Amino acid sequence: MAPIISRNTETITFSLPPPQAQRLREVAQEEERTVSELLREAIRLYMEEREWRAKERMKRRSRQANTDETEAR
């Protein structure tokens, strides 16, 4: 009986226009990486940037609230 190998990943399927899919495969080959590795990195970078933008919006709102409070005095 073959050992059961636990995966810590989940497969997600999505579609790309053929030129974009081809370019992705080309970049993966140039980088000597898999398409999955490139996509994981792209998603990680997107999520980090998204979190950064959310934090920046919160800072701006806080500064604006402080400015509004000061002007009301």
Image: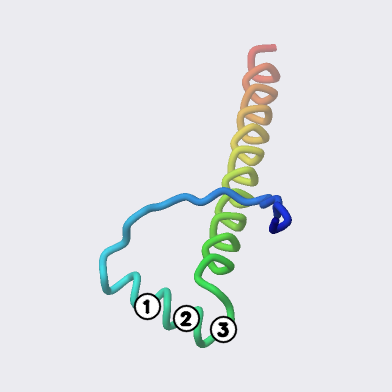
Q: How far apart are marks 1 and 2 (CA)?
A: 6 Å
Outermost residue on the left side: it is 18
Could you classify mark 1 by the number of other residues whose Cα lies within 10 Å: few (under 14), some (14-19), or many (20 or more)? few
Location of the C terminus (image quadrant): top right
Say which quarter of the image contains residue 3. bottom right
Q: Is mark 3 on a helix, strand or loop?
A: helix
Q: Name the residue under label 1.
A: 23
Give the left or right position of residue 1, taking residue 33 as reference: right
Neighbor class of circle 2 (other Cα within 10 Å; few <14, some 14-19, many 20+) is some
User: Which residue is labeled 3 in the image?
Assistant: 31
The one nearer the camera, 10 or 19, is 10
In this rendering, position of residue 63 left or right of residue 22:
right
Q: Is residue 55 or residue 30 the one in the foreground?
A: 30
Instruction: Say how many tags the image has.
Output: 3
Of residue 42 and residue 1, the one placed in the foreground of this image is 1
Q: How has the structure been colored for display? A: rainbow
Sequence-wise, the earlier of marks 3 and 1 is: 1
Amino acid under disc 1: Arg
**Amino acid type indicated by mark 3:** Glu
Q: Is residue 66 above or below residue 7?
A: above
User: Percent position (x, y) of residue 49?
Assistant: 60, 51
Q: Position of residue 52 (x, y in %)?
A: 64, 46
Q: Mark 2 points at which residue?
A: 27
How far across and how far down the image is residue 69, in percent?
67, 16
Quadrant of the image containing the N terminus = bottom right
